[in-house]
Amino acid sequence: MIEIEGVGKSFGQTKVLDGVNLRVAPGEVVSILGASGSGKSTLIRCINGLEKLDNGSISIDGFRVDDPKQLQQARRCSGTVFQLFHLYPHMTALQNITLAPVEVLKVPRREAEDAARELLASVGLSERAEAYPAQLSGGQRQRVGICRALAMKPRYLLLDEVTSALDPEMTAEVLDILAKLAAAGTTMLFVTHEIDFARQISSRIVFLEQGRLLADLPTAEFFAADGGLAHPRIAQFLSKMKKDH
Amino acid sequence: MTFDPTLLAPYLPDLAAGARLTALACALALAGGLALGVIVALLRASAAPLTRRLADIYVDIFRNVPFIVQLFFLFYGLPELGIELNAFSTGVLALSLAGGAFTSDVIRSGILAIDPGVIEAAQVSGLSRRVIYQKIVLPIALRTSVRPLGSVFVNLILTSSILSAITLNELTGAAKIVAADTFAPFEVYALLLVAYVTLTYLVSLTAGALHRRLNRERALGAN
Amino acid sequence: MRYTDFTVHDILLLLQGAGVSVALFAATTAIGLMIGLTWAVLRYYRTPVLAPFFAAMAELLKNSPVLVQLFLVFFGLPVLLETDITPVQAAVITLSGNTAAFIYVIAVSAIESIGREQLETARVFGLSRWQILRKVVAPQAAAFGLGPLTGLLVNQLQVTSLISVIGVLDLTKVGAILNLRTLKPFIVWTVVGLLYYLMAKLIATTCARLETRLRAHSQWKGL
């Protein structure tokens, strides 16, 4: 269970997160929607400990993210996939995926490589195991990024706008894989602009506006006229996103 | 006006011996300077302000004091402390200390140029600071620093000529003796210029080739 | 502590030596600037024969040790030209040439940072190459070049320490004399090093101040 309680975060004078409460239970697929600057990415970065909280607390399976002593263990419960991939440029796809399992989980190299190849196969990149990130397309890099996160067998997968930097064709590739993961029961918390996709695979939708949680509803309710759409800000947002698509 | 390079012919073995000594001293100093530079670069990135300050001071001193003064300080000072090093060792030590200061600047730039997102990805994977430095930060920084490190090495080779001032018979020191023997200083020193230029050119070429080799598929660093 | 071997006179000696160092630094910097800029202008005009010749000379001077250049001029030239050269003359010739080579490189690089379109536009407006150089290229190149120039000046100050090897009574030579007399290397070389350090910092801050003045007067916010 990811427990986010009363989280507040400011950058200088700007309040980016304000009193956010959220719970994600194992098996759920939760999408975080909102306009740019609404605090979505910051929330993810608070969950994996990249940003420090000003108030409130976050814990993953009981490990407090805001406690430096527990942060490592909290991090082991989750895996993150980034908008800009952030693959290790000096390592092959295979090495990118095996690094953490070997160094952190102390998995023997052979085992880690076999597992990594399986992951690459599941995303359709078997022949690219020895390629370097510079030799891969954006979509391929993101797929490696997903494998890298999955290699640590995290209980929760955090995805931060993972298709925003990809063109439509590659976006479809990656969304495909995410849909498969969701269907297989992976707990996912993702920030996205892909409304249709969110609607398709999420069990729950959360809407952030200027750092505040405006809605936290099961998907169907969120898109219902008397549910999420009843909120003017949400309706405005959704119609704008539809227009841009 | 006479210019007769053939006078030098019988002395070429002596000059070659000097060149070998230069090469050896510089190779050792490069290794020492590189190791020192990495350590200092890491210290300069330390969380403790005192460590950072001390490391910065070390670099500042060695970059703003003439090498010959540093050399004399060690050559005449160390025996006072009871440390008896011969001219070669003192020279290598001095070159390493100076080289370390310049190398640490290069590596520090290399570290700062790393995409912070890559480090964040490593951090959230649960990798410890030590492993992140060992497997990610340093390998990337060193790969992108090959050309600037080549420049530092060239600098080291040129600076090594100053070791002749503490009676080391590296290339310049050997040349001084040959000049005295042949009474043909112009020919000797002109040859020496050509020798050093050739040596530094070869080093630059090698650095470029090494950079291309290491970064071929990785596309790290500007070409 | 009692430094019975040191006298007040020694302080005067050190200051005198520092004065010699500074004087030579200033003179050779001025001469080197003129020569180096001339070479750069020749290259700008693409003068046949001269431009490539000086480019080659600059490469030679940049990639060989200053000490060897000093020896070539001080020991070699007199034999070649069958004339006498004093240590100071040799120092001035060598350091000016060495500085010129580096100025040349900085100037060329600064000129080339200026976009082609500016020069082409100016030509279209009928300005002569000289007018373009004076009004368009020079001010911008000066702004670009000031940063690298600062580093060069600090370096060339330290290079002056090598003239002590051919007998010029500069700060380093005074240090060597005091060292020999008092046999207190730590004190002597620390003081000498400190003096060079302070002079280097003085140069660096002066150049920094010059840079801010230059930027304030021009209104190029995009530099």
Image (tube, coloured by chain):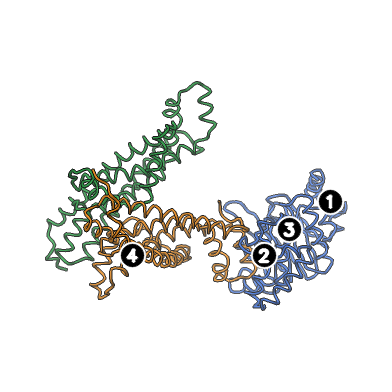
| Residue type (three-letter) at the residue carrying disc 2 | Ile
Give the label on residue A47, or none: 2
Residue A226 location in percent, x, y?
87, 53
Residues tagged by mark 1 and mark 3 found on one chain of the structure: yes
In contact (CB < 8 Å): disc 2 and disc 4: no
A2 sits to left or right of A179: left
Residue beneath the point at 29% across and 46% down:
C95
Can residue C100 be seen?
Answer: yes
Dot 2: chain letter: A
Q: Which residue is mark 1?
A: A229
| Residue type (three-letter) at the residue carrying disc 4 | Ala
Give the spatial CA distance, label 4 vs label 1. 86 Å
Dot 3: chain letter: A
Residue beneath the point at 54% across and 57% down:
B211
Query: Label 3: how many residues lie within 10 Å, few (<14), some (14-19) or many (20+)?
Result: many
Q: Earlier in the sequence, mark 1 or mark 3?
A: 3
| Residue type (three-letter) at the residue carrying disc 1 | Leu
A117 versus C90 height, above or below: below
Image hue for chain A: blue
Q: Secondary structure at mark 2?
A: helix
Give the spatial CA distance, label 3 vs label 4. 56 Å
Q: Secondary structure at mark 1?
A: helix
Can residue A53 be seen?
Answer: no
Shown in green, the chain is C
